Amino acid sequence: GFGAVHESGAVALRSPAAATVLVVNRAIGWGAAQAIDEASLDRLLAVYGDAGFGIELCVRAQTAEVLAWLKARRFRRLSRSQMVACEATKAKSAGRYETWARSTGLRVDRVGAEHAATVARLCCENFKVPSALARWLQAGMLGEGWRRWLAFDGDMVVGASLSRVRDGVGWFGWTSVNPSHRGRWIHAGFVARQ
């Protein structure tokens, strides 16, 4: 029952089977690709009906007016996150990764499909997503172009991430780090390695 549609300049993800999980019930990029108005918010609300969902609002759309529309509809800020778009070359990234690895004593490795269950389990545990979604996540990461990544402290797995490259554009996400290793710049290691 998982679906994704384009609405009001956002990608609206929806999973009726996991109605309380905002990581799969959210609108991504609202206000990033086009101007938004109150009517576009109402169209987005219609995609979800009575189900709960989150909105990832781009920085330039976080005006007092837009925040008032959201507040009037009982939305509240849960967390801050960011998406970054940049030009990347392999030479620059390799140097950043080597510097990170030397300074932290940790490593990030690209792993094969045989590790998909581990990546899915870590992502679900660290994002507090119901374990039932691990199978969905695992199936998705086995598709063409997807790459799986694990972070290690010695032989111990301490984090996981996914990436995908298509038509010269890369995406990475679901980057999760075990509570025991947070604050050690592991996310930066994933970014540099990916």
Image (cartoon, rainbow, N blue to C red):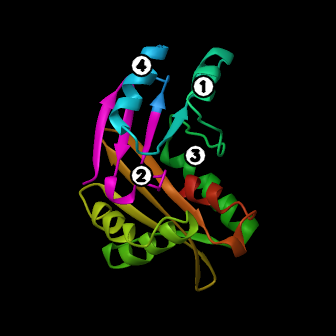
Would you name the residue on which mark 4 appears?
40
Q: Which mark is residue 121?
A: none
Q: Please, is residue 167 above or below residue 101 in the view?
A: above
Give the Cα distance between marks 3 and 1.
Answer: 45 Å
Would you name the residue on which mark 1 appears?
72
Would you name the residue on which mark 2 appears?
24
Q: Quadrant of the N terminus?
A: bottom left
Instruction: Single out the mark in the foreground, 3 or 2.
Output: 2
Are the residues tagged 3 and 1 within 8 Å (C-beta)? no
Which residue does the image show at 38% across and 71% down from the upper left? 132
Name which quarter of the figure residue 81 lies in.
top right
Is residue 179 visible in the rendered image? The answer is yes
Q: Residue furthest front?
A: 50
Indicate the amino acid at tag 2: Val
Indicate the amino acid at tag 1: Ala
Which residue does the image show at 69% across and 59% down from the upper left? 99
**Which residues make up the magenta segment?**
1-28
Indicate the amino acid at tag 4: Ser
Residue 183 % position (x, y): 75, 62
Residue 123 % position (x, y): 50, 66
Name which quarter of the figure residue 119 lies in.
bottom left
Q: Please, is residue 14 above or below residue 116 in the view?
A: above
Would you name the residue on which mark 3 appears?
92
Label 2: state its secondary structure: loop
Q: Is residue 16 magenta?
A: yes
